[in-house]
Amino acid sequence: MDQNRADRAARLFLSAAAGAAVTGAAVGWYAAKVEPRQLTVSRPELCRRPPVKTLFFSDVHFGPMYSPEFLEPLVDAINAEEPELVLFGGDFFAKFVRDAHMLDFSWLAGQLQRIKAPLGKYAVWGNHDVRQGAAPFYRMLMEHGGFVPLWDKIVQPAPGVTVCGLAPYSDGKVLRDMPAEGWRVCLCHMPDKARYLNLSRVDVMLSGHSHAGQLQVPVLTKMILPPGGKMFPQGLYRPQADRPAQLFVSRGIGMSGVPFRLLTPPELVVLG
């Protein structure tokens, strides 16, 4: 009898182990092959809606983990939303020195040129876009793609619409020159900077960087969130209690660190 119980227990254990292995393999396959291709569109409800339809995307990280070939369907998805204004939050590159040989800059610029936005296309640098000597190549790529790169600079693409683009490690002093009226957006790659930037003349700050951790797993997600993206990992926030400015943090498009996305699908953000 005791031997029978032991045999049953062993069979149950082996069955459970096999089931766990199959489940783990299925989840790993989904996180590596399925979810990274499931582009979603978020439409956050802002306290002050923009007067023009604005599309924001960030963190494409083209390289071995997220092939440049995905740019073409990404551009198609952007154009399908028919935005008037397009904003990019930085980190076009993954690891520039490692990946430069696999990036066809002429083709990439041609795809970026296809993005239609009658009021203009603007971009900021992410931390990966300034590392390893990448900054001038990023500027060249964006400009050839029809984007205006903003390095601590303010532009007004339409009457009553102001965009401020901050450099990756900016002190934010340029925000003092934001107008007192109109709809005002700040592009800042790292969301945690919203804690101390002067957002008194900003309606919404748009960020990326965190990828929402890429994997939504208890405990682990907080551990793998990057510096500068730990306080506000994804979604809509009011980062400063004494100011009405809102912060929206995108999950981004590509992958960095690990070649998986689990419960954090890539995201386009449409405002207005």
Image (spheres, rainbow, N blue to C red):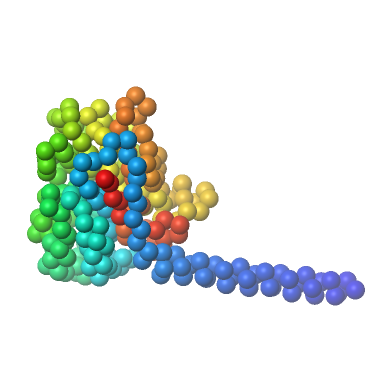
Figure disc tally: 0
Residue at 41%, 70% in the rendered image: 33
Q: Is residue 13 left or right of residue 20?
A: right
Residue 38 falls left or right of residue 161: right
- The answer to which image quadrant residue 176 occupies is top left
Front residue of 127/45: it is 45
Image quadrant assignment for residue 191: top left
> Is residue 68 in view?
no
Residue 187, image x and y in percent? 23, 42
Locate the C terminus and report the quarter of the image it occupies: top left
| Along the line of sight, the residue nearer the viewer: 22 or 111 | 111
Is residue 268 left or right of 264 when viewed as pictured? left
Residue at 51% in and 66% down: 27
- Asked if residue 243 lies left or right of residue 212, the reply is left
Location of residue 114 in the rendering, given as x and y in whole percent from the top left corner: 15, 63
Q: Residue at the spot x=46%, y=70% of the render?
A: 29
Residue drawn at (14%, 36%), measured in percent from left and top?
160
Q: Is residue 238 above or below residue 22?
A: above
Residue 207 spot, x, y in % from top left: 29, 45
Q: Position of residue 102 (x, y in %)?
A: 21, 70
In the depicted structure, whether residue 39 falls above or below residue 139? below
Examine the image and state in which quarter residue 15 appears: bottom right
Q: Nearer the viewer, residue 199 or 76?
A: 76
Quarter placement of the N terminus: bottom right
Residue lying farthest right?
1
Can residue 265 be seen in the rendering of this structure? yes
